[in-house]
Amino acid sequence: MRTRLLPLLIVLMAGVLLALGFPLAASLAASEQQRVIVDRLDDGARFAALAQFVSDTSPGTDERRATLRGELASYHDVYDIRVGIFYRDNRSMAAAPEDWVVPYEGEGRRAFREALLGRRSHDPPQVWPWQGHARITIASPVVRDGDVVAVVVTDSPTGQLRSRILRGWLLIFAGEAAAMLLAVGAAFRLTGWVLRPVRVLDSVTHDIATGRMNSRVAATGGPPELRRLARSFNEMADNVEEALEQQRAFVADASHQLRNPLAALLLRIELLAMELPEGNEEIASVRTEGKRLSQVLDDLLDLALAEHTAAELRLVDVGALTAERVASWRPVADDKGVLLTGECGAATGWADPVALSSALDAVIDNALKFTPPGEEVTVTVPVPKGTDGVSVVVADHGPGLTEDELVRVGDRFWRSGRHQNVKGSGLGLSITRVLLTAGGGSLAFAPNEPHGLRVTVTVPRHAPADGGRSTGQGFTER
């Protein structure tokens, strides 16, 4: 979520900064150019005041004209600005350089015509830093006895103006960059503050989904809405945990309470069988179903106890334990005509020895149950290399399971429709998974080529954080 929220905030803040930066840059350029225009207008007004006293008919005109030309020449030499005073008929009263004439087109001609009307010329177009040959032309009227007799025209280069504008823009860019960095830092802090409760909630949800029912969200940070969500989530988790606890208690109590009446019922069936002829099919069927019901009750009680009992984790020689279980099941395999082999390398992991033994018994029993005579069941403990777990792989050459069945294998009371005639309650692998999860282990199923099922039992290689005690729900007690 952060990868989606953070770019959105950055784009929004960049848009705001750009929306402020462009007008500011344009305003800076206009301000710098206006300073130049005001200076040229002041200079034009000074030259216009001198030109008022230059007349073709008045005494001393030549001396005044010489003085005016000297002023214009000095101005041009110092500032490199072309300046000229032109009569209404375009004749030059004085100019620097002397060969400069009034422009005949463009912005200079427009300014000249406006000055002849007695108005100061309009501001010239804005000059930008990339316009290397741009110039600014300003015209001011020379008024004598209420009439415009001449026009002062200045034509200025824009190199310094463009340099000042560019420096101002660089400062604005630096300020925007600094503001953007601060905004990005603030966005990181903001998104972290907003999303921290979401990450915690996601982690706790995963913990609960994987069986760690006592996980809760600490509603101490983030926006008020997320804190309320965390409190609501904790209330929901409390209710779910209570409901599951009641369900486990009900299953355990019901299984326990039904065992005695069922045992009495089976005893009466045996007594009744003694009164009937040997080999009575109805009695045999009732006896079989009774034993099956007794097995289901035992499995339900084992499942309820497995879900509620704490696992005592310790460092276990997984290879030696697996070899022991293979040896215990080999007579059963020989009796069925199945070859049971074991390749148990040296590997140690953290597990409850009783729980791991029960899990291996359930998996090996399941493999032998579905493997036809003449086939092979292999149990291997590969040497762990660069992994966090120690695995025991049990592979058979039975009929295997389809992709849809692999998704459901291990669910409570589920059995494949093709194996309904095989003895079992459908709870063995469920109990195995609960026992392994309680110690941080796992149970995985995959096809075994060319046919069959491959079951992988995995336990952690490293010690748990609580020093070796985990609850039946599969979480570390805190």
Image (cartoon, rainbow, N blue to C red):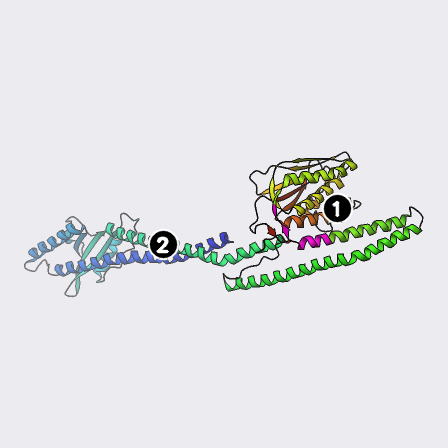
Say whether residue 136 is left or right of residue 68. Answer: right
Say whether residue 431 is left or right of residue 265. Answer: left
The kind of residue on which mark 2 rests is Ala
Q: Which residue is mark 2?
A: 178
Percent position (x, y) of residue 221? 49, 61
Magenta-highlighted residues: 301-314
Say few, some or many: other residues with alpha carbon within 10 Å of mark 1 (under 14 / 14 to 19 / 20 or more). Answer: some
Report the Cα–Cα distance between label 2 and label 1: 66 Å
* Residue 453 visible to an observer of this rendering: no
* Residue 179 visible to an observer of this rendering: yes
**Residue 246 lies in quadrant:** bottom right
Measured along the vertical axis of the image, is residue 226 above or below residue 384?
below
In this view, the residue in front, 407 or 349, is 349
In this view, the residue in front, 97 or 37, is 37
* Residue at the image position 72 percent from the left and 60 percent from the top: 250
* Residue at the image position 94 percent from the left and 48 percent from the top: 277
Assess whether residue 274 is covered by the magenta stretch: no
Residue at the outermost left position: 59
Percent position (x, y) of residue 115? 22, 59
* Residue at the image position 9 percent from the left and 54 percent from the top: 66
Q: Which residue is mark 1?
A: 416
The kind of residue on which mark 1 rests is Ser
Say whether residue 225 is left or right of residue 145. Answer: right
In this view, the residue in front, 305 or 395, is 305
